[in-house]
Image (cartoon, grey):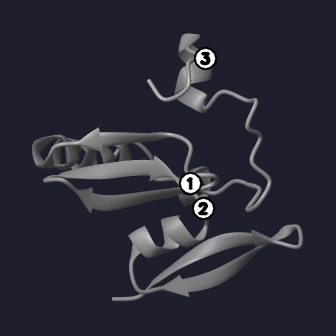
């Protein structure tokens, strides 16, 4: 099954087709998930600076959390917003870290 996502290009949304959603997230430089040492390395894909290692059970729990999150909104527009594809603000804290006052890198 192919997946069509909406990519911001030249100031407007354009449909782009991918074989998998993981491929789309990696290509759009959002995140990657790789198998490493019996676990999974989940990382941001802008400059690959931040990552976390998850066990198989933790990755399954993440999947369950994502499914639960998907049930909270019936508004498909809430999942799309403009995002820079190559411009990463390395000085800005990510959403969760900014909301919780954590500025440490790699922890």
Task: Give neighbour class at mark 1: few <14, some 14-19, many 20+ (Cα, 10 Å).
Answer: few
Are discs 2 and 1 less than 8 Å apart at CB? no
Q: Which residue is mark 1?
A: 79
Q: Which residue is mark 2?
A: 29
- The residues tagged by marks 3 and 2 sit, at their Cα atoms, a distance apart of 22 Å
- The residues tagged by marks 3 and 1 sit, at their Cα atoms, a distance apart of 26 Å
- The residues tagged by marks 2 and 1 sit, at their Cα atoms, a distance apart of 16 Å
Q: Is residue 30 left or right of residue 81?
A: left
Q: Quadrant of the C terminus?
A: top left
Give the residue furthest to the front: 37
Give the residue furthest to the top: 101
Q: Between residue 102 and residue 107, name the one nearer to us.
A: 107
Disc nearest the viewer among 3 and 1:
3
| Residue ID at (24%, 42%) | 54
Residue 62 % position (x, y): 26, 43
Vertical position of residue 52 compared to residue 43: above or below: above
| Residue ID at (16%, 49%) | 60
Find residue 103 and name its label: 3
Vertical position of residue 107 compared to residue 26: above or below: above
Q: Is residue 105 left or right of residue 68?
A: right
Are discs 3 and 1 less than 8 Å apart at CB? no
Q: Is residue 22 left or right of residue 38?
A: right
* Nearer-N-terminus badge (3/1): 1
* Nearer-N-terminus badge (3/2): 2
């Amino acid at each position: 099954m192919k997946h069509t996502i909406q990519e911001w290009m030249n100031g407007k949304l354009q449909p782009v087709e991918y074989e998998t959603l993981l491929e789309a997230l990696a290509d759009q430089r959002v995140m990657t998930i790789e198998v490493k040492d019996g676990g999974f390395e989940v990382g941001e894909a802008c400059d690959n600076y931040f990552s976390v290692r998850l066990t198989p059970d933790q990755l399954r729990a993440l999947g369950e959390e994502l499914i639960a999150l998907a049930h909270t909104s019936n508004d498909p527009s809430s999942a799309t917003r403009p995002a820079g594809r190559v411009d990463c603000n390395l000085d800005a804290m990510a959403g969760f870290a900014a909301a919780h006052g954590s500025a440490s890198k790699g922890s």
